[in-house]
Amino acid sequence: MFDNLIIVDNPLVKRELTVLRDKNTDSENFRAALDRVAYSLAIKVSETFGMDKVEVETPLEKTTGHKFNKEIIVIPVLRAGLSLVHAFHTLIPDAKVGHIGLQRDEETLQPIAYYFKAPKNLDHAKTILLDPMLATGGSASAALNWLKKRGAKDLTFVSLIAAPEGVKRLQEEHPDVRIYTASLDRELNDAGYILPGLGDAGDRTFGTL
Ligand code: PRP
Ligand code: URA
């Protein structure tokens, strides 16, 4: 249906998504399930990492090993994107972490920027933008614009649930950015929430319902 969209829907992810969608799941279990899904997302994204060969000496002889050919930078969109950081950072412990603060205006659905901090060498790195929810695409598109203005060239966007409206928008505005998600849901409702979705990811993660 969409080019450049990778849906990571292995059985582990499908089971956790059921927990995440369930309105009766409390914050503690919501965060834990999201963390488990994030490992599958991170492993799938890592398939695109370029590698250089390096020599390594085992206790017995020299052999060939591997290292990433670019630095990895992960950038969560505050707040909800923070829920995806732990798994990425655990699997890529030398990744640098930037932060982008965006709050969607509940009336206009436009993103309002309130914080930006990223490592300086974005132009030479592989940059992975994290936000569990891709709804209208306004927040992700604004974050990608900001990263590109600061030199990022090799960009990937990782979400948990994407709406077709948001995927379409990102592909029109950022055709160079590959999108990963655990689920392509049906549509947005009039308030800009994803259906069936899971509700407000930030509120459910941090217990601010
Ligand atoms: C949510 C979500 C995305 C954004 C998606 O954040 O985490 O950042 O909405 O919507 P969009 O695709 O229509 O822009 P929200 O603004 O609710 O902030 P929060 O993470 O602080 O809860
Ligand atoms: N943000 C969320 O947290 N959930 C949605 O369904 C849409 C935007």
Image (cartoon, rainbow, N blue to C red):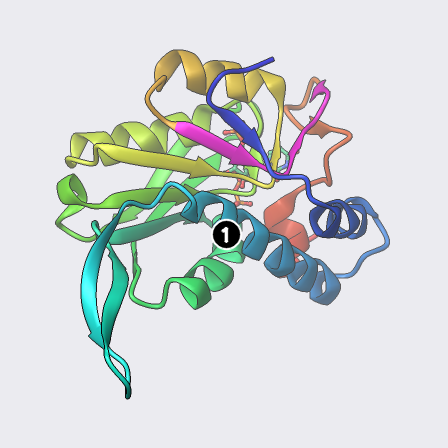
Left or right placement of residue 183 versus residue 11 in this view: left
Left or right placement of residue 190 versus residue 164 in this view: right
Q: Position of residue 195 (x, y in %)?
A: 74, 27
From the viewer's perspective, is residue 16 above or below residue 165? below
Closer to the camera in the image, 193 or 167: 167
- Mark count: 1
Closer to the camera in the image, 101 or 62: 62
Say which quarter of the image contains residue 94. bottom left
Task: Tell me if residue 98 is in the magenta stretch.
Answer: no
Q: Position of residue 174 (x, y in %)?
A: 35, 20
**Helix, strand or loop at mark 1:** helix
From the viewer's perspective, is residue 21 above or below residue 108? below
- Residue at image coords 44%, 64%: 91
Residue type indicated by callout 1: Ile
- Residue at image coords 26%, 35%: 154
Density class for disc 1 (Cα within 10 Å; few <14, some 14-19, many ≥20) is: some
User: Does the image show residue 108?
Assistant: no
Closer to the camera in the image, 36 or 165: 36
From the viewer's perspective, is residue 61 above or below residue 142? below
User: Does the image show residue 196?
Assistant: yes
Closer to the camera in the image, 84 or 63: 63
Left or right placement of residue 15 versus residue 43 in this view: right
Task: Tell me if residue 181 is in the magenta stretch.
Answer: yes
Q: Position of residue 167 (x, y in %)?
A: 52, 20
Q: Which residues are magenta?
A: 178-187
From the viewer's perspective, is residue 104 above or below residue 132? above
State whether the magenta stretch is mostly helix, strand or loop. Answer: strand
Q: Position of residue 13 (x, y in %)?
A: 70, 48
- Residue at image coords 36%, 17%: 175
Looking at the figure, which quarter contains the N terminus?
top right
Residue designated by label 1: 43
